[in-house]
Image (spheres, rainbow, N blue to C red):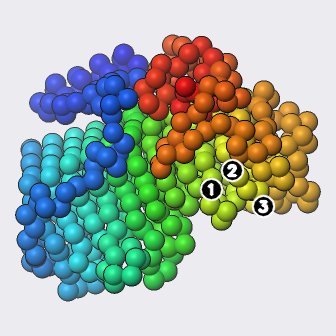
Amino acid sequence: MKKLCAFMLAFFYLSAVEPPAGFFMEHGIYSAAYMSDWSKLGTGKDIAKKDLNAFHFTDVNGTTAKEKYENMSSVYLTNKAVRVSWSIPADKYKTTMFYIRECKEVIVDRLAVIQNNADNAGSQSLFIEDCDVVVVKNSYFAGAVNQVHLRIENCGYVFIDGVEIAGIDYSGNGKFRNGAGIFVEGGQMDSSGKLFRRYSSNARDIQWLTIQNCYIHDYTFGDKWENKDGIQLHSVPNGTLFNCFVENWDMKYADGAIDVSHRRTDLSNRVFRIERNIIYNCSLTKSPGTGTADDAVVWVNNIFINAFYGDYHHGWKNVFLHNTWLYDDPHANVHYKLWGFDGPAQVMYSLIVSPHSMQMIFQNADGGVEKYREYYPQRNVYALAQTTPWLVGVRKEKLTYDEWRAMGKDEGSMLLQNSGSAAITRTGDTYSISSRSPAAQFSDGVYTTTNDARYRVSRDFNGKTRPMRPTAGAIEAQ
């Protein structure tokens, strides 16, 4: 890891580009916000939600007012705010408001774009591709777009901080239209080993990605379902998605709150850490893609409320440590779906609470009936309705928890027969847990002191030091 950090610093030195302030390209450090006192750190919603009165908006026609920056050493796009209307059909480039390509250093600060067209005529609010270093911070993007608000493709080092993506209720009836929120593309590889989603000869391989303190919310209506995720990350490098808040993202019209994947087999040993995020009243989070066995996505200290997980990844490791899933919507009746999945997925020290009956693990026909064997849960606490079936789907029979355990699954886990037994108290989008809870001191602490910072869980969601016998879930008992 020290060699990796030294390499990155050497890159910045040789290219005469300064590393962005407040960001650190080392696992376990990541940023000033990450190293701060989390007991005093607001959620992504607290930090990124904008006061629109602080922006001075100008109404513009996008066809004539759109801006393009190309082949420049530095681009500083700051303090601009537009309400844009389009008079032509959506097009990837023609209806992008701000487009930047082939630049060494890009800094975007206090940029605000509101899309006036409810018909998705705008394609992107901000599109950046083939640049060395990209920083986007303190910015606001809202309304319906045909593709994605903040699109970054094939750039070397990417830092996103304090961005809000908001839906707009154009009709005034409580139905919010939006577009995909944040999309970072790192290239993909097909089954023959051919690299694609590389649109120029100067596409960069992404080396480091930090996204933090962002608020993505309100996609609850559209004319049809569209594949538009709140945060979508293809071929993630080393880095982190930290302290973001995704809210009200409805899969009837959009897709996942978070879609994260490794998609290249020509790269390896890339570990991307997703920590201290809140996924609130969104339909799902998910992970597709094919990578190498040395690649991983590590989910730590996250809180999911009424969101199931859809898994259809191959080859790389999907690792969950100390996460909490809370369900209070009776329509949220499935916890983990194995789609075209061959794993592996490791799920440990979770707290999963539901007051109603739900399917814990569902598997479809893609990938075969034995794919559940690559799903490895261990030392989790389940506080569920008593009638909960465990494994359902293409298998003819539904397995109970005891039958699931008899197959060697969920070693060391605990099933509580009602949700109240977890002794948690909900407070809006978070919760507290009593020291009397069976989940307290339940975990074995293997990851509390590990030397590998990529997997270490030394703090809980609130910044409290994890003891040697930590509480299951994202928050320590008190």
Q: Residues within 10 Å of mark 3 (few under 14, many from 20)?
A: some
Quarter of the figure that contains the C terminus: top right
Camera-side residue of 254 and 152:
254
Q: Earlier in the sequence, mark 3 or mark 2?
A: 2
> Left of 124 or right of it: where is 358?
right
Residue 240 location (% of width, % of height): 40, 36
**Which is in the foreground here, disc 1 or disc 3?**
1
Type of residue at label 2?
Ser
User: Which residue sits at x=17%, y=61%?
Assistant: 52
The residue positioned 80% from the left and 29% from the top of the image is 411
Query: Which element is circle 3 on?
Result: loop
Q: Is residue 421 above or below residue 445?
A: below
Instruction: Give the residue number, with chain letter if any, for mark 2.
Output: 354
Residue appearing at x 9%, y 44% in the figure: 73
Mark 1 or 3 closer to N-term?
Answer: 1
Labels 2 & 1 near each other (Cβ < 8 A): yes
> 297 or 110: nearer the eye?
110
Pointer 3 with pointer 2, Cβ within 8 A: no
Residue 49: percent from the left, percent from the top? 27, 53
Q: Please tell me the numbered disc located at residue 365.
A: 3
For label 1, the residue is 328
Residue 362 visible to the viewer: no
Q: CA distance from mark 1 to mark 3?
A: 29 Å
